[in-house]
Image (tube, rainbow, N blue to C red):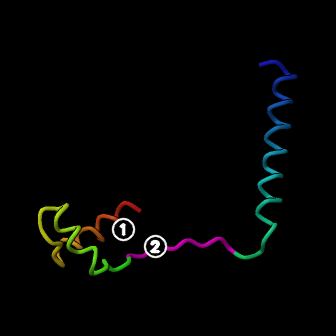
Amino acid sequence: MGSGRQALVVALLIVSGAGVVVWSMRDPRPITAGFWFDDIRPEATAELADRLGGPLTSDDIARIRSIARDEL
């Protein structure tokens, strides 16, 4: 890689790094994320049972939640 190309790469890294710093300073509040499960609505229970071949048991729901948390 020639010295001109190296200088361009370094300049791009510096500019992009400065952009990240400026972007992160735009709002002093920390970025947060949430993860939760909504309850299954009673009207959806019959449709789910039809699609799944039977109703979801509490063990099924616990397993789904456990797998989802592990994936995160």
The part of the chain drawn in magenta is 30-37
Q: Position of residue 37 (x, y in %)?
A: 38, 76
Mark 1: secondary structure: helix
For badge 2, the amino acid type reads Phe
**Where 58 sits versus 20, above or below?**
below
Q: Is residue 35 magenta?
A: yes
Q: Residue at x 28, y 78 (%)?
A: 43
Q: Position of residue 67 (x, y in %)?
A: 29, 64
For badge 1, the amino acid type reads Arg
Pick the residue in front: 64 or 13.
64
Q: How many marks?
A: 2
Q: Is residue 14 magenta?
A: no
Q: Nearer the viewer, mark 2 or mark 1?
A: 2
Q: Residue at x 76, y 63 (%)?
A: 24
Q: Residues within 10 Å of mark 1 (few under 14, many from 20)?
A: few
Marks 2 and 1: CB-CB under 8 Å? Answer: yes
The answer to which of marks 2 and 1 sits earlier in the sequence is 2
Q: Residue at x 79, y 41 (%)?
A: 13
Q: Quadrant of the C terminus?
A: bottom left
Residue holding disc 2? 35
Q: Is residue 35 left or right of residue 57?
A: right
Q: What predominant SS class does the magenta segment belong to?
A: loop
Q: Quadrant of the N terminus?
A: top right
Pick the residue in front: 34 or 17.
34
Q: Residues within 10 Å of mark 2 (few under 14, many from 20)?
A: few
Mark 2: secondary structure: loop
| Circle on res. 69 | 1
Q: Is residue 63 left or right of residue 9?
A: left
